[in-house]
Amino acid sequence: MTDSPDGDMEIYDLRVSVDRIEGRSVCGMAIGDSFDLVNSAHLKLPDGKHFCVYALAAVLPFLAAKQRDLAAGDWLDQDSLFACPDPEERLVMKVERTCRRRMNSADLT
């Protein structure tokens, strides 16, 4: 059930992309590989592409916070780079806000 057609909260869609690989790509990912997080909780991958589950696990805890407005000076508002835990790979991901959308919290809980 929707409380308001305009929604009662605003949230950002995100794109997580491989910014650089400083070691060797053992998971088969390349610079530019990405996924989008839209509508609060929907992961979308480009057709025929994959995203390493270990890289995803490294960035996942931060995505809910990156979807929301953060306090001025919050370190997470300033930082957008996250590293995969594989020391051989040294894959670095960038999290970017792609658009802001209005949603109904009643639809999500």
Image (cartoon, grey):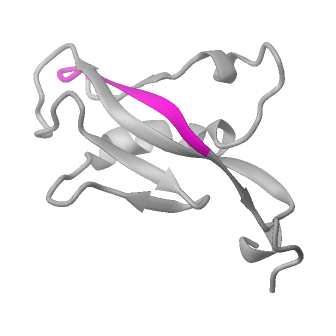
Query: Which one is nearer the viewer's eye here, 32 or 76?
Result: 32
Q: Give the side of residue 63 with respect to residue 21, left or right.
A: right
Q: Is residue 28 above or below residue 105?
A: above
In the image, the segment drawn in magenta is: 87-99
Quarter of the rendering containing residue 58? top left
* Residue 46 image point, x, y percent: 25, 55
Q: Is residue 96 magenta?
A: yes
| Main secondary-structure element of the magenta-colored stretch | strand
Q: Position of residue 42 (x, y in %)?
A: 49, 63
Residue 28 coordinates in the image, percent (x, y) = 10, 39
Q: Quadrant of residue 67?
A: top right
Q: Is residue 32 magenta?
A: no
Left or right: residue 34 compared with residue 72: left
Residue plotted at (56% across, 61% down): 41
Which residue corresponds to the image point at 67% horizontal and 22% vertical from the top-left?
A: 77
Residue at 43% of width from left, 59% of height from top?
43
**From the viewer's perspective, is 66 left or right of 87?**
right
Quarter of the rendering occupied by the N terminus: bottom right
Q: Is residue 53 above or below residue 1?
A: above
